[in-house]
Image (cartoon, grey):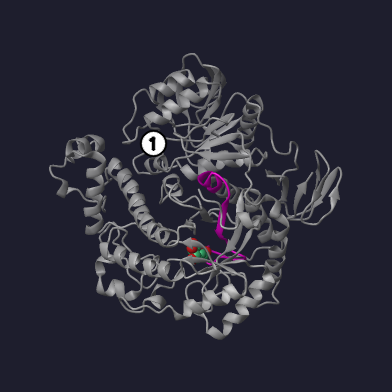
Amino acid sequence: MAALPDATRGRLLYGGDYNPEQWPESVWPEDIRLMREAGVNLATVGVFSWARLEPRPGAREFGWLDRVLDLLHEGGIDVCLATPTASPPPWMGARHPETLPRDEHGRTVWYGSRNHFCASSRVYRDYARRITEDLARRYGSHPALRLWHVNNEYGTHCWCDGSAAHFREWLQERYDTLGALNEAWGTAFWSQRYDSWEEIIPPRRAQYLNNPAQQLDFHRFTSDALLGCFTAERDVLAAHSPDIPVTTNFMPLFSGQDGWAWASEEDVVSVDVYPDPRAGWEDAAGAPHGALVQDLTRSQARGPWLLMEQAAGPVNWRGVNHPKPDGLMRLWSLQAVARGADGICFFQWRQSRQGSEKFHSAMLPHAGEHSRLFRQVRALGSELTRLTDVVGDQVPAGIALLHDWESWWADGQDGRPSAGLDYPATLTAWYQALWEQNLTCDFAHPEATLDGYRLVVIPHLYLLTDAALDNLTAYVRAGGTLICGFFTGVADADDRIREGGVDSRLRLLLGLTTVHEWWPLDEDASVRLDNGARGTVWSEDLETDTATTLAVYAEGELAGRPALTRHTFGTGVALYVSTLLERPALRTLLADAAAAAGVLPVLPGAPAGVEAVRRGPLLFLLNHNREPVTVPLPQPGTDVLTGTRHEEEVTLDRYGVAALRS
Ligand code: GAL
């Protein structure tokens, strides 16, 4: 992973998507003036400019972009230059309909919006390569250029004939023989055996449930096909400007790409953080959702990362779109810095007056430079200059949460024991129980090396590969502590069920003989355990072998059966939790296991709603409460944001932040 572009200059990046093509040129000088006033030092240009750059096939109109880049450079603002390939011009779809995606029903997904491309289309890829090549040639050594931004939020799916042919190639590569594919997909079931490669299609809309292994492979294929688009553009850019790092912006906790595989192909990992559609800034779940996405991105990056987009105020895609109250934009931006971001950017710089996002907020709103929002943008830009101490620094974490996109895909299909299984919700519940106690964690792939983590937590990984099982076994044997959540290790990499309820290696590790049956719980139902905890979503009929039972189910069909177990294995410990505990119990379980493993909260006893994170030399305290709160300090420190020295305590305003250096 290359360093972020400004790490060596010791400043945090600050800026946003800049779409000057939406405005007359007479507005541009004002943009530069106001960017300078706001402390903006990075503008992401050209994300949706393809039709402007290539108004007809093969034509090039670069003059306007030359002027934009020169103006930004004269203003001292660096450029994150995007390839425009997320939104092909209408002429491409009109002339080459095969570039347009088709949905599961075979219906065309038309142009007139964005993201209307089939990742497998040769025609699309050729046009994308050529415009990328010309951009790289023309701007690869422009003095304003700091970072390349490829495409935007890759995530399209396509079930067209071109994708089908590409899918078959991908499958041939993976399985080599048709026999191996038939075996992996379990095609003996429902008479699905394939007799020739040509018969294989993507999992299109069928009469009843699709083959789950085929669906899983289609997820893998789609992620790889899109990744192929990314790496093709990246390689062109790298060939022309080897010193300029390349990124593409991820969506937050998004299932459409294998984020581990993708991150390893990027020089800089960047993400867009918007509120979870299920949780906004109106409710308490907004802050932990942001923290989760930030910790995941830092883990993907293995270090500092870039917040490529967030909203300065309201978005326009929720049912009701509220502005951010005073202080919240600052709070969430500084949360990202605390959790490893070396740059804070927004969608977008100037609010559009036309198009689908004219009601989406921007750094410079319709209300202009004297608005409440722009004042806050200016203030944040100035504050970020006081946080240079953390640029390039790590966020120490003793806990790893294991997360895997492949398991998410396999888990999210139809025909499961319960439609209530919700992978991101389960991951979030466990993460939030750590977050609420200021126990900092990284995320890790289940096959990744876990050395250095004292506690490893698996909220729920339905699919575990043989390599992952060996990895977990070795980790615990060597003295690690593992907490394993329900319905984990059930399937192999082909979504084939491992017999005995969960895999035999995992049972050995957990000290279980078998899992007799899954007993999912109804929506809104819960079950009491004899230690006073309540479980939701799921329960299991377990039989222990060498494990000790810590708690049993206290009611219902499983009354008296083990719910929570503990097992010493090698020199380590493995706990199993066969239900989704409600948060108070989950917090206690995690706190106890962390303490026993020697991991302590960043700030023990911090008031509720106060997030404490260490990054480099600074202790960040973030008040997510809507009222002020006083936080006792373990040692005196100076708030680098205000210059004030605090001896025993610090009082944080509503949504207030302190960044303390001791
Ligand atoms: C992002 C996207 C931006 C803008 C933003 C609005 O997903 O990358 O271009 O659409 O959402 O929230």
Question: Residue 480: where, in percent of width, then height?
Answer: 55, 24
Q: Residue at x 63, y 39 (%)?
A: 396
Q: Residue at x 80, y 38 (%)?
A: 634
Q: Is residue 20 left or right of residue 93?
A: right
Splitting the image into 4 quarters, where does residue 479 fall? top right
Where 554 sits versus 165, above or below? Answer: above
Question: Residue 267: where, in percent of width, then height?
Answer: 48, 52
| Residue picked out by circle 1 | 417
Splitting the image into 4 quarters, where does residue 461 fall? top left
Local secondary structure at mark 1: loop
**Residue sticking out furthest to the top:** 546
Please tell me whether residue 304 belongs to the stretch shown in magenta: yes
Point out the stretch of residues depicted in magenta. 297-320
Picture mark count = 1
- Amino acid type at image mark 1: Pro
Where 59 sits versus 422, above or below? Answer: below
Splitting the image into 4 quarters, where does residue 184 fall? top left
Q: Residue at x 51, y 40 (%)?
A: 426
Q: Looking at mark 1, is its residue's CB closer than 8 Å to ligand 1?
A: no
Please tell me whether residue 383 belongs to the stretch shown in magenta: no
Question: In the depicted view, which residue is nearer to us: 363 or 623?
Answer: 363
Question: In the depicted view, which residue is nearer to us: 127 or 589?
Answer: 127
Q: Residue at x 31, y 36 (%)?
A: 494
Q: Is residue 5 visible?
A: yes
- Which quarter of the rendering shows the C terminus? top right
Q: Is residue 189 visible?
A: no
Specify few, some or many for label 1: CA neighbours under 10 Å numbering under 14, 14-19, or 20 or more. few
Question: Residue 124: where, in percent of width, then height?
Answer: 30, 65
**Residue sticking out furthest to the right:** 647
Question: Residue 419: where, in percent of width, then height?
Answer: 41, 42
Question: In the depicted view, which residue is nearer to us: 491 or 248?
Answer: 248
